[in-house]
Image (cartoon, rainbow, N blue to C red):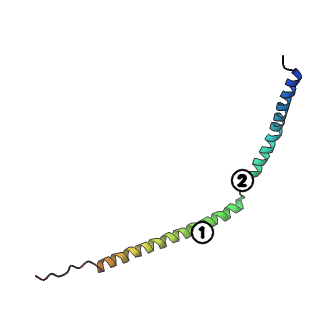
């Protein structure tokens, strides 16, 4: 027995029409959501503030690096002095 043409049309419309409606309405909605979630550009005034802060951070990091180098040099010097002072002494043998 051949399928009923009305049933075929009903099946096609029950799947195709909701799919098309979803695509036609869903695409613009998804674009709006992605534009809303997209990061906004930073105004130039804030960029100058940020660059000034970054320069201060850079100067602070440089100062810290110099101090760390001084500390490590001091530790090397102290370790060398201690090793020179504590040189192993051989016991005197009675000959």
Label 1, label 2: how far apart the Cα atoms are: 26 Å
Asked where in the image residue 25 lies, by quadrant, the reply is top right
Residue at left 81%, top 44%? 29
Q: Position of residue 16 (x, y in %)?
A: 82, 31
Q: Position of residue 71 (x, y in %)?
A: 44, 74
Up the image or down, 94 lies above or below 65; here it is below
* Quadrant assignment for the N terminus: top right
Neighbourhood count class around disc 2 (C-alpha, 10 Å): few under 14, some 14–19, many 20 upward: few
Residue at left 60%, top 68%? 56
What's the mark number on residue 38?
none
- Reading the image, the residue beneath label 2 is 39
Give SS at disc 1. helix
Up the image or down, 48 lies above or below 93; here it is above
Q: Residue furthest front?
A: 1
Q: Position of residue 63 (x, y in %)?
A: 52, 71
Residue at left 75%, top 47%? 34
| Pick the front one: 46 or 65 | 65
- Reading the image, the residue beneath label 1 is 56
Left or right, 81 with reference to 46: left
């Amino acid at each position: 027995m051949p399928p009923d043409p009305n049933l075929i049309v009903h099946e096609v419309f029950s799947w195709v029409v909701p799919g098309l409606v979803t695509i036609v309405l869903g695409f613009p909605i998804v674009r709006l959501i992605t534009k809303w979630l997209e990061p906004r550009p930073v105004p130039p005034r804030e960029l100058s503030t940020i660059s000034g802060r970054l320069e201060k951070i850079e100067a602070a990091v440089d100062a810290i690096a110099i101090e760390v180098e001084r500390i490590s040099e001091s530790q090397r010097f102290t370790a060398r002095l201690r090793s020179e002072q504590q040189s192993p002494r051989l016991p005197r043998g009675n000959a």
